[in-house]
Amino acid sequence: MSTQEYIESGILELYVYGKLNDSEMEEVYKMAVQQEEIKKEIIEIEKAMIYLSGSVAPRLSGKNYETIKQNIFGNEPKVIELQPETKPKSGWLGYVGWAAAVIFLAGGGYLFQQWNTGKQTIVNIETENTKLKQNKLDLELQLKADEETLAFLRDPKNTIVPLAGQEVSPTSYAKVYWNQETHTVYVDGAGLPEPPEGYVYQVWALKLNPLTPLSIGLLDDFTGDNKRIFAVDNVVEAEAFGITLEPAGGSATPTLEQLYTLGKV
């Protein structure tokens, strides 16, 4: 175990509090004699304990406090440094003194814990409020998007193109909403089965003579969108629309063997 690990293990605090047995006290004493860093750490712990003991002690009148302080420390608080020829003692009087200090420290620790718990509770509440505000904003944005989508689908100027199932999936169907004035296109994919893992549906605007496909978008997050209404790229000209199943990320040209739905304008 390194010197730093030995210091961080907590054994030096127990040494100062007098909570070790004789053999353990002897071991720490030898380590302190041999290593200046450990000796300094013990002295710092003693100083901190004296300070904390005074700061968390029960309130006393100034007169009583000074009397007790005078009896314990004399004129000035003293920190007893370890000397090579001085061995630690574990008599009962020492234990009583350190036990009192431990009680004082425990009281301070309890107050600190209560304060820290209250502080953490405030942080948790603030975090929860932030999440609620963000959720509210997300819901408002989603509601606005749904209202815009619904308004578009109800526009009488739309051309509605039904897409029927093809050989690979005869029971599939879809619907394209195309506004030829704004060139906006929405796809209703409710009649398509969930794509296999690693695949995605890709939508094509087609010119038929000669056959010229133009990719206008992917139906991403197909399983996560319960409504399965998707906005895709605008289309200026089209004679038909089709949907194929392609590897994730889409393809440059449609895989006709995986043509799920097709419909003429």
Image (cartoon, rainbow, N blue to C red):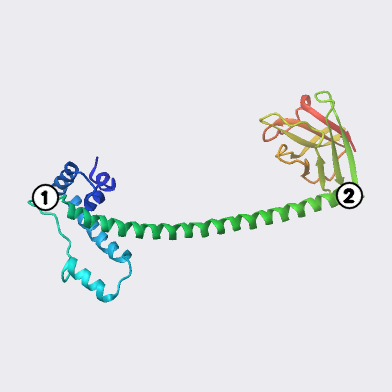
> Which SS class for mark 2?
loop
State the residue position of label 2. 154
Is the residue marked by circle 1 packed among few (<14), some (14-19), or many (20+) residues within 10 Å? few
**In the rendered view, would you say 32 is above or below 163?**
below
Residue placed at 77% from the left, 24% from the top?
Answer: 257
Q: Is residue 20 left or right of residue 59?
A: left
> Which badge, 2 or 1, is on the more N-terminal residue?
1
Identified by mark 2, the residue type is Arg
Q: Is residue 41 visible?
A: no
Q: Quadrant of residue 46?
A: bottom left
Residue placed at 83% from the left, 50% from the top?
Answer: 150
For the C terminus, give its image quadrant.
Answer: top right
Camera-nearest residue between 189 and 161: 189
Spot occupied by residue 125 in the image (x, y as percentages of width and height): 56, 58
Identified by mark 1, the residue type is Lys
Q: Is residue 158 left or right of residue 197?
A: right
Residue placed at 81% from the left, 44% from the top?
Answer: 186
State the residue position of label 1. 87
> Marks 2 and 1, how far apart in space?
92 Å
Q: Which mark is nearer the camera, 2 or 1?
A: 1
Spot occupied by residue 160 in the image (x, y as percentages of width and height): 89, 42
